[in-house]
Image: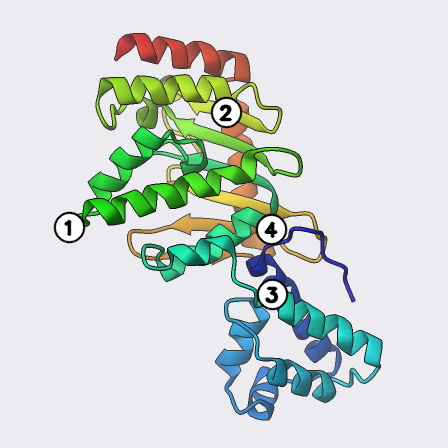
Amino acid sequence: MTQTQPGSGPTALRILLGSQLRKLRENRGITRDEAGELIRGSESKISRMELGRVGFKERDVADLLSFYGVEEPEARAAVMELVERANEPGWWHRFNDVLPTWFQAYVGLEEAASRIRTYEVQFVPGLLQTKEYARAVITAGAVGAGPEEIARRVDLRLGRQRVLDGEGGPMFWAVIDEAALRRPIGGVEVMRGQLQHLIDLMNQPNITIQIMPFSFGGHAAEGGAFSILRFQDADLPDIVYVEQLASALYLDKRDEVDRYGEVMERLCAVSTTPDETTGMLRQIMLDL
């Protein structure tokens, strides 16, 4: 069985476990309907398990391993150990009261990724936001939320940013539309502080920031913001995350991921170089 990298988040482990179960099932020529019937479930339950979108009951996995012909004790033990680790809650679960269920999976994937590439149109990416800017963004979007809830959402966002600190953090590559940088979220002073923060972050070796300038005109990513996550473990597929107003898409089919990858490459090719980014950020600060 595949060995996972130390520090892999529970969401990534669920995806890895689901992928292994799918391969075992397909190697035996067993349908999802047949597997679902065995564990007193349905085809859709097996599908969700194999995509890593639900937790795993030890009894279900043990029964499936027997059904798939996995009888060797060491092989079974490796899978069952993965079940236990995949079901462990991540640090972000203490924010479940303010964390939408459709976003929980992304936080786990973000925690486990070795590389994150993102394109943003309206806001500075969450992992790069200052506390003041994050509060302004969250307050504008959380209609009806009280001060305590807003504070907890800000704490969650700042907690996510720790993934970029220290050794072992992912390579983070952001392309930000110029419109997001010229929109004075929270007022001029908050925005200037945010722009200076981006300049400072450019000194971190694992962070690259480019700007898609107005002057370029139309471009390949007119469909909107998205992120592409890659993982250290070769058995984990790249995942494209596309956020919507009250839900999100998680795409892992090869043709879909490749399409977004091509768009990201084209964006990077026509956006500012890192040196140009710093100069442009300073000019925008002066223009505010």
Find disc 2 in the rendering and name its residue: 209
Label 4 element class: loop
Instruction: Decide if residue 116 is on the left or right side of residue 139.
Output: right
Q: Which residue is mark 4?
A: 238
Mark 2, Cα crowd under 10 Å, few <14 / some 14-19 / many 20+, is many
For image coordinates 39% across by 46% down, the residue present is 156
Q: Earlier in the sequence, mark 2 or mark 3?
A: 3
- Residue drawn at x 34%, y 41% as measured from the top left: 154
Nearest the eye: 40 or 257: 40
Between the residue at mark 2 and the residue at mark 1, the CA separation in whole angstroms equals 34 Å
Residue type at mark 1: give it: Gly
Find numbered disc 2 in the image and state the secondary structure of the residue it sits on: strand
Mark carried by residue 86: 3
Q: Residue at x 49, y 31 (%)?
A: 174
Which residue in the protein does label 1 denote?
Answer: 144
Of callouts 3 and 4, which one flags the residue occurring earlier in the amino acid sequence?
Answer: 3
Which element carries disc 1, helix, strand or loop? Answer: loop
Disc nearer the start of the sequence (4/2): 2
Asked where in the image residue 283 lies, by quadrant, the reply is top left
User: At which x and y percent is residue 221?
Assistant: 42, 37
Mark-to-mark CA distance, 4 and 1: 36 Å
Is residue 101 left or right of 144 when viewed as pictured? right
Viewer-side residue, 97 vs 141: 97
